[in-house]
Image (spheres, rainbow, N blue to C red):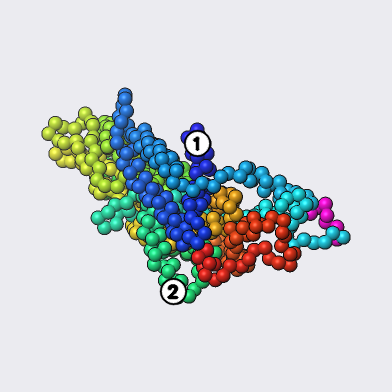
């Protein structure tokens, strides 16, 4: 919590100020260069994100420690901290080269007092005998100078445009949550490359590094040559539309995934799979169905029964009376181990969903007369008792070696084995039996099939969202700077960042309010909400008039006492070329 508090404090100091500080380095007439700076600035942020995503896990997997060797988190945290210290030193060394705008006091307090006075003054003079004023902030004229009022008008007009923007971030920030969860139900093997679900987020950073220069050097100039007035607000509208389409693509992928997912029991259902680990054939009597299982065979898949109608399952062998089995818990999967007419073990399955993070569940069934233990990598299955099953342990993709430790293993027999290739999101039961020569043999039973839908299908949705981010976020930073008065550049940048936080709250509210049985439906809902919001934003943008804060402030500096006529517009409309640049 201390670390998070320090990060929040540092972020609040850096983020609103660094982009405004960069914009301050450019003079009037350098709008094109300033636009390019914001593109490079955003590219640098994502290049850092990409490097940290790749390098930090490499540092973390190194083993370090005084008393015992563990994953080296001190190294993973220490290297970025040291690099941050170096970057601060480099930044300070260049201090003499920067153009610095001197602070002008607590501008937020001035703004709050001015707005408060305007509201109170308007309430006091709400009678019809007092003439209306052009803008509600003009009711502060009695106490505050016109320049401050004009600057606050600029800020409030931009902040009003910010109202719909959190919806974009509500979708964008689901890359690290909903989309990563989606990736855990997909197959990460793409050709010769194998990607873990949480690594798919690097696609966004890679695409940012590629698309920012392409947009800046190719797409925008091409649009300008076609004669289309592609203003900042039009770019942001297109960005919101592209993000909406990204979630439509995510919904389509989710529909394909759900076709391959196993069916898990609902609250009033029971799922059962029977595995014959004995030496004789067994008769299994289900409600309305009978199956004969040969030794070391299982029922084809988990069978689903309503708990209300499932009184019992009966087992028997030739010439023996049936034995009822009733120990089944509602809402769970079970594996029924049988090895004699009156000998069985009901094992409640610990999985009611696909294994998390795309990992693979492995458990062992002991058909021997004595207990054994199994070591697989760093995981240990302790004391797997006779005719019983262990708990699941979870492993990443690939082949895994395991060692069985038991007093029943003959000296001439090996005790080291290897799994088949583990994909993503599967679960297996390894039944340990004895061969005719007395040596152990593992027999593999598939409980949950591996994911089959490729993670490559997520690339189109990442591409659409990243295109939307480039035209929305980079443009939004530049627009916020260009439309802010000189003493409120950081204020508007902070307001822009506040929309990101509001977007995260929207995710919590929408996801909490609606309980979706199908994940694709939630994606469609978010896509529809952003599409509606983008239309609203486009209408709001249509009535926005771009201003040049520097020109307005220059007029006030030339004649502070001179006031605008009431019928004139204090925001001179920009010519077409400058508006396009903005």
Q: Residues within 10 Å of mark 1 (few under 14, many from 20)?
A: few
Q: Is residue 26 visible?
A: yes
Residue identifier under label 1? 6
| Up/down of 19 relative to 248, above or below | above
- Label 1 element class: helix
Would you identify the image quadrant in which residue 437 lies?
Answer: top left
334 left or right of 295? right
User: Going 50% across and 65% down the picture, which residue do you hit?
Assistant: 581
Query: What residue appears at the point 46 percent right and 62 percent down from the top-left corner?
Result: 32
Query: In the image as oriented, which residue stretches furthest toward the front?
Result: 558
Q: Which mark is residue 339?
A: none
- Point out the stretch of residues depicted in magenta: 122-128
- Taking depth in this image into account, of 100 and 360 the one nearest to the observer is 100
Label 2: how many Cα within 10 Å (few below 14, some 14–19, many 20+): few
Q: CA distance from mark 1 to mark 2?
A: 47 Å
Looking at the rendered structure, which numbered label has been put on residue 225? Answer: 2
Front-most of 499 and 220? 220
Question: Is 279 situated left or right of 182 in this image?
Answer: left
Q: Position of residue 46 (x, y in %)?
A: 40, 51
Image depth: mark 1 or mark 2 in front: 2
Whether 127 is among the magenta residues is yes
365 part of magenta stretch: no
* Residue shown at 52% from the left, 59% from the top: 28
Q: Who comes first in sequence, dot 1 or dot 2?
A: 1
């Amino acid at each position: 919590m201390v670390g998070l508090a320090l990060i929040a404090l540092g972020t609040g100091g850096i983020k609103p100020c660094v982009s405004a500080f960069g914009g301050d380095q450019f003079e009037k007439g350098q709008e094109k260069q300033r636009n390019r700076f914001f593109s490079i600035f955003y590219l640098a942020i994502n290049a850092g994100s990409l490097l940290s995503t790749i390098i930090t896990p490499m540092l973390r997997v190194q083993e370090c420690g005084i008393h015992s060797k563990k994953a080296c988190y001190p190294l993973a945290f220490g290297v970025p901290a040291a690099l941050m210290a170096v970057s601060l030193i480099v930044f300070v060394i260049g201090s003499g080269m920067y153009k610095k705008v001197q602070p002008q006091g607590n501008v937020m307090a001035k703004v709050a007092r001015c707005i408060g006075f305007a509201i109170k003054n308007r309430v006091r003079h709400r009678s019809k005998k007092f003439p209306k004023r052009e803008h509600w902030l003009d009711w502060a004229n009695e106490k505050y100078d016109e320049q401050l009022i004009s600057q606050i008008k600029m800020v409030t007009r931009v902040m009003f445009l910010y109202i719909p923007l959190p919806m974009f971030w509500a979708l964008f920030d689901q890359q690290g949550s909903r989309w990563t969860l989606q990736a855990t139900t997909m197959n990460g093997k793409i050709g010769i490359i194998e990607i873990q679900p949480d690594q798919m987020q690097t696609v966004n950073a890679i695409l940012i590094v590629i698309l920012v220069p392409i947009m800046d050097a190719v797409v925008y100039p091409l649009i300008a040559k076609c004669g289309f007035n592609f203003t900042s607000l039009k770019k942001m509208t297109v960005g919101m539309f592209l993000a909406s389409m990204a979630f439509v693509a995510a919904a389509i992928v989710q529909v394909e995934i759900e076709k391959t997912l196993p069916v898990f029991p609902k609250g009033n259902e029971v799922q059962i799979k029977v595995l014959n680990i004995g030496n004789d054939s067994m008769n299994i009597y289900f409600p309305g169905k009978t199956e004969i299982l040969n030794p070391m065979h299982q029922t084809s898949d988990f069978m689903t029964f309503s708990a209300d109608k499932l009184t019992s399952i009966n087992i028997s062998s030739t010439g023996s009376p049936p034995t009822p089995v009733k120990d089944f818990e509602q809402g769970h999967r079970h594996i029924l181990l049988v090895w004699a007419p009156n000998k069985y073990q009901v094992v409640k399955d610990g999985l009611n969903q696909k294994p998390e993070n795309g990992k693979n569940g492995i458990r062992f069934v002991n058909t021997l007369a004595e207990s054994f233990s199994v070591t697989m990598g760093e995981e240990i299955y302790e004391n797997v008792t006779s005719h019983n099953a262990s708990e699941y342990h979870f492993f990443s993709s690939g082949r895994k070696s395991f060692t069985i430790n038991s007093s029943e293993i003959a000296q001439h027999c090996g005790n080291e084995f290897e799994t088949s290739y583990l994909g993503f999101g599967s679960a297996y039961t390894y039944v340990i039996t004895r061969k005719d020569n007395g040596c152990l043999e593992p027999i593999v039973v598939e409980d949950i099939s591996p994911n089959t839908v490729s993670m490559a299908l997520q690339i189109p949705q990442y591409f659409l969202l990243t295109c939307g981010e480039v035209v929305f976020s980079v443009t939004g930073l530049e627009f916020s700077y260009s439309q802010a008065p000189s003493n409120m550049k950081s204020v508007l940048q902070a307001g822009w960042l506040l929309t990101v936080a509001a977007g995260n709250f929207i995710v919590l509210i929408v996801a909490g309010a609606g309980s979706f049985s199908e994940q694709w439906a939630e994606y469609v809902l978010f896509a529809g909400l952003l599409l509606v919001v983008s239309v609203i934003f486009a209408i709001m943008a249509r009535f926005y008039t771009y201003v040049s804060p520097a020109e307005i402030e220059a007029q006030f500096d030339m004649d502070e006492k001179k006031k605008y006529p009431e019928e004139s517009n204090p925001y001179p409309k920009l010519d077409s070329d400058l508006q396009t640049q903005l």
